[in-house]
């Protein structure tokens, strides 16, 4: 008799605990459902439909994909996105690691250097980008003034097909360098000093110590950062949106920018969704690898 | 590497302080944490010379690369339009005038824009904390049926970068399913999506998991309800992580560009980034620069004050997954 009432009481408690738990969860569930889960599904659905939000949507198969595929900006958009990502990797991936290595050796001004390198990251991106727009001015901008003062040929930066994309990469790198640097710096400080001492006893010079101790010890974080940076830079939008509008001659149009244009300038939101799905697939590959790597990191 | 949220890696800098009292040869370099270069090498006559040279170079180049552009921005805002286009440019403004700031404040209606942004950031902060803390607490301590699945689905959203779902998210806000509300140009368009943040849930849940069970059980025996336990036991001990999540949320909303660009197109409702960007081509150069300075100041101040929290969030950020 008593065991039965006890069991019933514990069951009632379990039910109550679950009800409370879902009460606590409901706010987050609603937010996630409306603004994360549902849009994810809808993104895919819309890419296979024609919708004008007045008539019922029509399923059109791969029609939207074909439309964007035949767009003359489609090829340049992907090419520029990949180029942007590669250039940003060349400048923005190795450099923070080298900076972190040097910073880690310094015993003075550390707080200042760490603060300063992270300042641009804290600025709102729109502020950073518009600031560089002024620096890039062909006649009176800071960059050409400096080049001129050094008796170097001036560049037309954003106005030439040769330099526009690189100019965007420079802005983006300036704004994002700080986070990589500080993450590497934190990783470097976890390397046990015995490893360096042992390497030193074995007669390894400075470069060898970096190669055989520092890099193996930070290998996972280096790999994780590589993937994160690829995922982040492939979504480049604000730089072309504010600085070049995709020009000159499509030399800076990117996938997300084209996606935006489809939805808000060309009035073809389904085309934008088709582009979004393509980008989603590409980024998912990197995300999956990232997840694998970071899981390894934790164990 | 595990993110240490309570003690950011500041230990290495603390140590050299111990050397201050002792007498050392001039230019002696304190040892600190053992790094690639050995302390012995560092304090050899050559090592010392190289060290000071590198230090000078690094400080100079960092100042040139990261401080000088900001200096140029602030002084640029003080120059007149004629002085801005002068060749060669003046290093110091010929007179320190704050006119451009006043003009920017008036012309671009920065009071309204900053007020809007503060409303969005503040509301998002309150909303995100309430929603995400309760959710993470439920998932961590109450462990309901299907809790693992819910957590998995929340973390899965981290795999899909926000940019690729911006169009359907925009449509959702424009015509909220079931309810049929149009949330465009309302603060809710910022607040609600801000709370759907898998990374916050991840950070909070991981922290709550580390709170010892005994602490909660003691309160439970005293007859405290789950809500009461959350409020008077869990939240007080979770201050460090709440600080990190708060600052991440506020700074992210303040800095965000693409999302407010889509959902706040009404000039009366724009955030400061969007407002300035949309007016940028119609403004005299010095007024625009002054506006940039004003828009940049709040985040820089936040960074000054909450550096530790921000850097702790950053190192935790590299491990999300």
Image (cartoon, grey):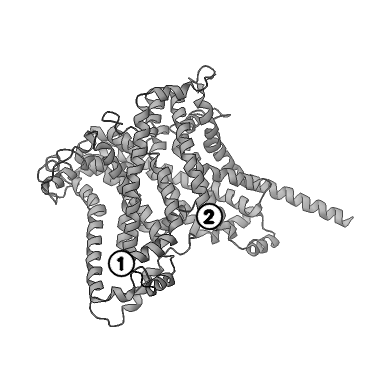
In this view of the protein, can residue B128 be seen by the observer? no
Q: Which of the two residues, A254 or B232, is positioned nearer the viewer here?
A: A254
The residue where tag 2 is placed is A296
Q: Which x, y percent locates residue B54? A: 24, 64
Q: Which x, y percent locates residue A156? A: 19, 37
Q: Which of the two residues, A82 or B268, is positioned nearer the viewer here?
A: A82
Q: Which quadrant holds the N terminus of chain A? A: bottom right
Question: How many angstroms separate mark 1 from mark 2 (CA)?
Answer: 31 Å
Q: In this view, does B67 lie to the left or right of A285?
A: left
The residue where tag 1 is placed is A106
Q: Residue at x 59, y 45 (%)?
A: B152
Q: Tell which subunit mark 2 falls on.
A: A
Q: Which x, y percent locates residue A197? A: 40, 73
In this view of the protein, can residue A43 be seen by the observer? yes
Q: Which of the two residues, B102 or A110, is positioned nearer the viewer here?
A: A110
- What is the secondary structure assignment of the residue under circle 2? helix
User: Hey, which residue is sitting farthest front in the picture?
Assistant: A203
Which quadrant of the view contains residue A59? top right
Which quadrant of the view contains residue B290? top left
């Amino acid at each position: 008799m008593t065991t039965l009432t006890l069991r019933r009481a514990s069951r009632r408690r379990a039910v109550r605990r679950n009800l409370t738990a879902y009460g606590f969860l409901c706010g987050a569930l609603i937010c996630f459902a409306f603004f994360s889960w549902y849009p994810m599904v809808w993104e895919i659905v819309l890419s296979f439909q024609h919708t004008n939000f007045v008539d019922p949507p029509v399923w059109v198969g791969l029609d939207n994909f074909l439309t964007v595929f035949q767009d003359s900006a489609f090829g340049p958009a992907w090419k520029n996105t990949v180029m942007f990502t590669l250039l940003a990797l060349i400048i923005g991936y190795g450099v923070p690691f080298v900076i972190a290595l040097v910073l880690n050796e310094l015993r003075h001004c550390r707080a200042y250097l760490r603060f300063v390198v992270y300042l641009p990251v804290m600025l709102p991106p729109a502020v950073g980008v518009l600031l560089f727009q002024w620096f890039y001015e062909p006649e009176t901008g800071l960059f050409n003034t400096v080049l001129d003062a050094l008796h170097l040929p001036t560049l037309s930066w954003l106005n030439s097909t040769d330099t526009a994309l690189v100019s965007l990469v420079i802005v983006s790198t300036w704004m994002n360098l700080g986070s990589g640097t500080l993450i590497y710096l934190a990783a470097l400080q976890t390397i046990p000093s015995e490893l360096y001492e042992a390497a030193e006893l074995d007669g390894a010079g400075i470069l060898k110590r970096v190669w055989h101790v520092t890099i193996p010890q930070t290998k996972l974080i280096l790999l994780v950062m590589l993937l994160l940076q690829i995922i982040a830079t492939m979504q480049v939008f604000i730089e072309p949106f504010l600085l070049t509008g995709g020009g000159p001659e499509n030399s800076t149009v990117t996938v997300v920018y084209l996606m935006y244009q489809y939805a808000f300038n060309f009035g073809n939101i389904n085309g934008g969704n088709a582009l979004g799905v393509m980008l989603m697939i590409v980024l998912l590959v990197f995300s999956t690898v990232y997840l694998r790597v970071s899981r390894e990191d934790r164990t | 590497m595990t993110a240490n949220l309570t003690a950011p890696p500041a230990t290495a800098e603390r140590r050299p302080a111990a050397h201050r009292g002792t007498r050392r040869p001039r230019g002696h370099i304190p040892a600190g944490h053992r790094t690639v270069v050995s302390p012995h090498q560092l304090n050899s006559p050559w090592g010392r010379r190289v060290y000071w040279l590198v230090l000078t170079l690094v400080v100079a180049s960092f100042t040139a690369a990261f401080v000088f552009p900001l200096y140029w921005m602030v002084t640029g805002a003080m120059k007149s339009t004629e002085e801005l286009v002068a060749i060669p440019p003046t290093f110091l403004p010929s007179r320190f005038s704050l006119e451009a700031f006043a003009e920017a404040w008036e012309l671009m209606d920065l009071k309204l824009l900053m007020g809007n942004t503060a409303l969005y950031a503040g509301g998002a902060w309150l909303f995100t904390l309430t929603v995400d803390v309760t959710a993470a607490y439920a998932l961590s301590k109450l462990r309901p049926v299907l809790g693992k699945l819910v957590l998995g689905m929340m973390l899965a959203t981290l795999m899909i970068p926000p940019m690729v779902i911006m169009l359907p998210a925009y449509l959702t806000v424009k015509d909220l399913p079931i309810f049929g509300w149009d949330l465009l140009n309302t603060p809710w368009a910022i607040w609600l999506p801000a709370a759907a943040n898998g990374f916050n849930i991840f950070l909070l849940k991981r922290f709550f998991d580390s709170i010892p069970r005994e602490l909660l059980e003691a309160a439970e025996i005293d007859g405290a309800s789950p809500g009461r336990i959350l409020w008077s036991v869990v939240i007080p001990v979770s201050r460090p992580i709440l600080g990190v999540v708060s600052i991440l949320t506020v700074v992210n909303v303040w800095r965000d560009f693409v999302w407010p660009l889509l959902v706040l197109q009404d000039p009366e409702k724009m955030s400061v980034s969007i407002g300035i960007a949309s007016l940028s081509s119609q403004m005299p150069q010095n007024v625009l620069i002054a506006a940039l300075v004003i828009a940049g100041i709040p985040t820089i101040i936040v960074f000054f004050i909450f550096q530790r929290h921000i850097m702790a969030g950053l190192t935790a950020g590299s491990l999300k997954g």
